[in-house]
Amino acid sequence: VLQLVEVNGSPCLKFTEDEEKMTIPGTKTIYRLYDAAGHPFMDLMALEEEASPIAGQELVVRVLGQLDETSKVVPITVEPLHRVYFSHGQVCEPLPSLAEVRNHAQVSLSTLNPAHRHLHEPQPYPV
């Protein structure tokens, strides 16, 4: 789903009464945070100009859909996820093959905590 968050360098906000459908204005980047067991426990969206999270340092976060509450987390490992493949209509990084994409998806799924992989009543994975 494409969400407009910026036009000509100016942040844009979608107003709606449904908090889950609101957009957060500004260009963002995303990080995957891992626990001591090597399982990802949260994907963190941050504004592009914000400092990157650092492994071992406490972060104060808000979970989408629960923006009025804050939590503190300490990631053991931080993995940047945001990749730019196209910019201004040009390919700026070689595209992965279908086999590489499939392998990446399988590896990512295998690292998830089993509580998030249950087919019936899985534990929600926070963003």
Image (cartoon, grey):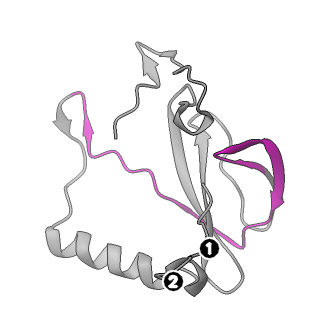
Residue 93, image x, y percentages: 25, 50
- Badge 2 amino acid: His
| Within-10-Å neighbours for mark 1: few <14, some 14–19, many 20+ | few
Q: Position of residue 109 (x, y in %)?
A: 42, 78
Observer-nearest of 13 and 81: 13
User: Compared with residue 70, is residue 3 higher up or lower down, i.e. above or below?
Assistant: above
* Viewer-nearest residue: 42 or 91: 42
Q: Are marks 1 and 2 in contact (CB under 8 Å)?
A: yes
* Residue 67, magenta (yes or no): yes
Residue 30 screen position, x and y as percent: 53, 50
**What's the magenta region?**
61-88
The residue identified by callout 2 is 118
State the CA–CA distance, disc 1 to disc 2.
8 Å
Position of residue 3 relative to residue 39, above or below, is: above
Residue 23 - label: none
Q: Is residue 64 left or right of residue 105?
A: right
Give the overall secondary structure of the magenta segment.
Answer: strand
Residue type beneath disc 1 = Gln
Quarter of the image where one finds residue 89: top left
Q: Residue at x 65, y 45 (%)?
A: 65
* Residue visible at 82% across and 45% down in the picture: 69
Look at the image and tell me in which quarter the N terminus lies. top left
Task: Look at the image and tell me in which quarter the C terminus lies.
Answer: bottom right
Q: Which residue is mark 1?
A: 123
Say which element carries label 1.
loop
| Whole-percent x, y for residue 85 in the image | 27, 46
Q: Nearer the viewer, residue 70 or 57?
A: 70
Of pointers 1 and 2, the one earlier in the residue sequence: 2
Residue nearest the observer in this picture, 24 or 14: 14
